[in-house]
Image (cartoon, rainbow, N blue to C red):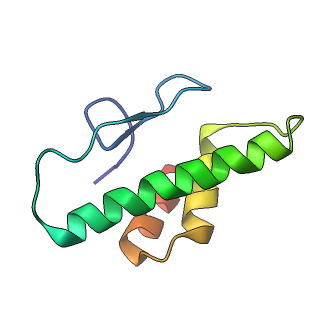
Amino acid sequence: DSFAGHGHELNCEHDYTVEFRRGKGTLNSISIHRTVELMTMIVRYAWKIARNPDMSVSRGDIYRFIAENTTSPALAELARKEI
């Protein structure tokens, strides 16, 4: 399954925007942890861009960053599918 695109966890349909569509009232601790980790990865990537304003940004760059930096094998695998 993809975790990107309209109706999924992370909507990157348009360049330079990120929309989270997660956290539908779940009590599942694994789901909550993965959601928080995904958001943390996006924030870390945003800080990287803020420190390097001339850096090019693309969806593939974001997914690559997630795949290389997450502690979740499942999240890394989903990100690799989007690269």
Q: Residue at (45%, 51%) from the top-left corner?
A: 39
Drawn side of residue 48 relative to residue 53, left or right: left
Q: Residue at (76%, 43%) from the top-left corner?
A: 49
When the figure is inspected, residue 82 is found, relative to residue 27, above or below; the finding is: above
**Residue 3 location (% of width, % of height):** 34, 49
Drawn side of residue 81 relative to residue 25, left or right: right
When the figure is inspected, residue 58 is found, relative to residue 72, above or below; the finding is: above
Q: Quadrant of residue 27?
A: bottom left
Query: Total label count?
Result: 0
**Residue 20 location (% of width, % of height):** 37, 38
Q: Residue at (11%, 48%) from the top-left corner?
A: 25
**Residue 71 location (% of width, % of height):** 48, 77
Q: Quadrant of residue 59?
A: top right
Q: Is residue 61 visible?
A: no
Quarter of the image where the N terminus is located:
bottom left
In this orientation, which residue lies closer to the viewer: 37 or 69?
Answer: 37
Drawn side of residue 6 relative to residue 66, left or right: left
Q: Residue at (33%, 57%) from the top-left corner?
A: 35
In this orientation, which residue lies closer to the viewer: 56 or 41?
Answer: 41
Drawn side of residue 27 relative to residue 46, left or right: left
Q: Is residue 34 visible?
A: yes
Name the residue furthest right.
54
Q: Quadrant of residue 10?
A: top left
**Residue 43 location (% of width, % of height):** 57, 49
